[in-house]
Image: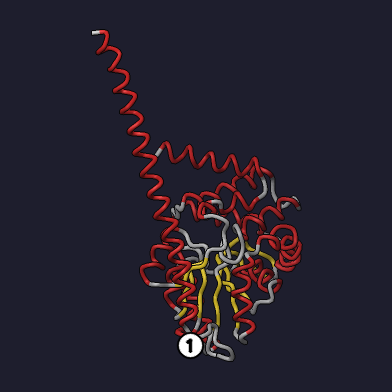
Amino acid sequence: MAALGWLTPRRRSATARSVLAGEASAEAARKSEQELQESYEQEHAKARDAEEPPFPVEGDDKAAAFFDLDNTVMQGAAIFHFGRGLYKRKFFQRRELTRFAWQQAWFRLAGVEDPEHMQDARDSALSIVKGHRVSELMSIGEEIYDEYMAERIWPGTRALAQAHLDAGQKVWLVTAAPVEIATVIARRLGLTGALGTVAESVDGIYTGKLVGEPLHGPAKAEAVRALAGAENLDLARCAAYSDSHNDIPMLSLVGHPYAINPDSKLRKHARERDWRLRDYRTGRKAAKVGIPAAAGVGALAGGTAAAIAVHRRRR
């Protein structure tokens, strides 16, 4: 009996170690598969680039490029960086900044686009600018760009935009951010202009309402379609760039779609359709850093991420 008592814990310990070994092996296999897939994508992109004719085509005045802003051209969300700048200038209180940060981080990290939540986020942003002059916000936007945004521009994406400009093509930002912010960023980057969400103003003063709805998802595609018609562009010769599956309607509209720093859904969609992929992040996990990492407010970011984690555990 003594011998049996001595063997029993050994068997249990061996079982636990076996489970651990199996889990570790599975994780290593999954990681290896992911790394191999990324390596394949990079080699495939190089081979395809070598085989295909140069793009963009120089002197093609029927072509243009459309770039999403958040996490495509710039790390993080433009509206959050703008909010930080307004808070610094005492446009609103700290509790409003925390609420604003939570709304933006939830949208980015949790991937949830609940209509009521998005409406609350829009109302919060609009209430901040209500009663202020458009010219005032534009002027402040120039300062905020230098303070928070300039250093967050992805060099790789910036080079892609410059390639289109060098080819003599127009380059537009297409974003759900307010058109005033988007216009400042486009001008500072030397781009043609910007399509963005339009906040209503009367006599140059914001009313706290939107004109239509935020330029998000399908609305971006409609904006690009309308601009292409006005500019006499051939969409089959145009390019579009985005990190988000929400922009699949816009990407599907053009002949040259690019997935830049793609989220998992867009990456999968792009692979299935053989779209070009470019990833300028230091690691795949950077896809979920989003707004808090770009915010530079450690305590606020940590609290937001923790709150999201708690919410997920409770669901």
Q: Quadrant of residue 11?
A: top left
> Are there few (<14), some (14-19), or many (20+) residues within 10 Å of tag 1?
some
Q: Residue at x 39, y 40 (%)?
A: 24
* Badge 1 element: loop
Determine whether 212 is above or below 61 in the image.
Answer: above
Quarter holding the C terminus?
A: top left
Q: Quadrant of residue 60?
A: bottom right
Q: Residue at x 61, y 50 (%)?
A: 293
Q: Residue furthest front?
A: 3
Q: Nearer the viewer, residue 98 or 252?
A: 252
Q: Residue at x 41, y 61 (%)?
A: 37
- Measuring from the top left, give residue 132's x and y in whole percent: 71, 61
Q: Amino acid at mark 1?
A: Asp
Q: Residue at x 47, y 78 (%)?
A: 256
- Measuring from the top left, give residue 84's x and y in whole percent: 68, 52
Residue under circle 1? 234
Q: Nearer the viewer, residue 228 or 286?
A: 286
Q: Mark yes or no: residue 213 visible.
A: no
